[in-house]
Amino acid sequence: MRLCAGEASVGELADPFDMALPSLMKHIHVLETSGLVQSEKSGRVRTCRLSPDALLGAEDWFQQQRAIWEARLDRFEAYVMKLKKEREPAGKPSRTRERKGTK
């Protein structure tokens, strides 16, 4: 979340965590390898920033997954409603039971 506000040094990123800098650098390296974060070193300070283009690709993937799962859940809901309708006795209106202790 910190990088959403702009660039930050590795030290600034490490401050909120109880973590040694070498451990944090391993995490940053993974993010760099995936293309989500870029960093550059100037003197003794390494500065990190988000790579928005990589995040757009991730957003596209999430949107595709959302569409797939919404369609699956819609089909599942239709199936459950069909089963429920098939189990209702013919000619009787549907009743929902009230749980004890709820109103």
Image (cartoon, rainbow, N blue to C red):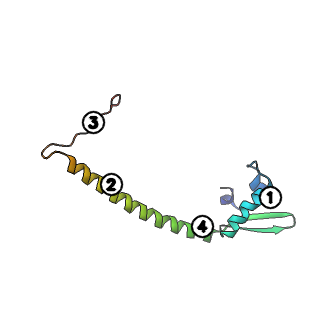
Q: Amino acid at mark 4?
A: Leu
- Measuring from the top left, give residue 41's x and y in whole percent: 81, 68
Real-space CA distance between mark 4 and mark 3, rounded to the nearest whole angstrom:
47 Å
Q: Nearer the viewer, residue 100 or 56?
A: 100
Q: Where is the C terminus found, in terms of image quarters?
A: top left
Real-space CA distance between mark 1 and mark 3, rounded to the nearest whole angstrom:
59 Å
84 relative position to 6: left or right: left
Observer-side mark, 2 or 4, equals 2
Answer with mark 1 or mark 3, whichever residue precedes in sequence: 1
Q: Report the number of numbered marks.
A: 4
Residue in the picture at 80% in, 53% down: 20
- Name the residue tied to disc 3: 97
Q: Secondary structure at mark 3?
A: loop
- Name the residue tied to disc 4: 55
Q: Secondary structure at mark 2?
A: helix
The part of the image, by quadrant, that contains residue 8 is: bottom right
Q: Amino acid at mark 2?
A: Glu
Task: Answer few, some or many: residues within 10 Å of disc 2's Cα (few below 14, many 20 plus, some between 14 and 19).
Answer: few
**Up-down relation of residue 31 to residue 1 (above or below):** below
Real-space CA distance between mark 1 and mark 4, rounded to the nearest whole angstrom:
25 Å
Q: Amino acid at mark 1?
A: Pro
Answer with mark 4 or mark 3, whichever residue precedes in sequence: 4
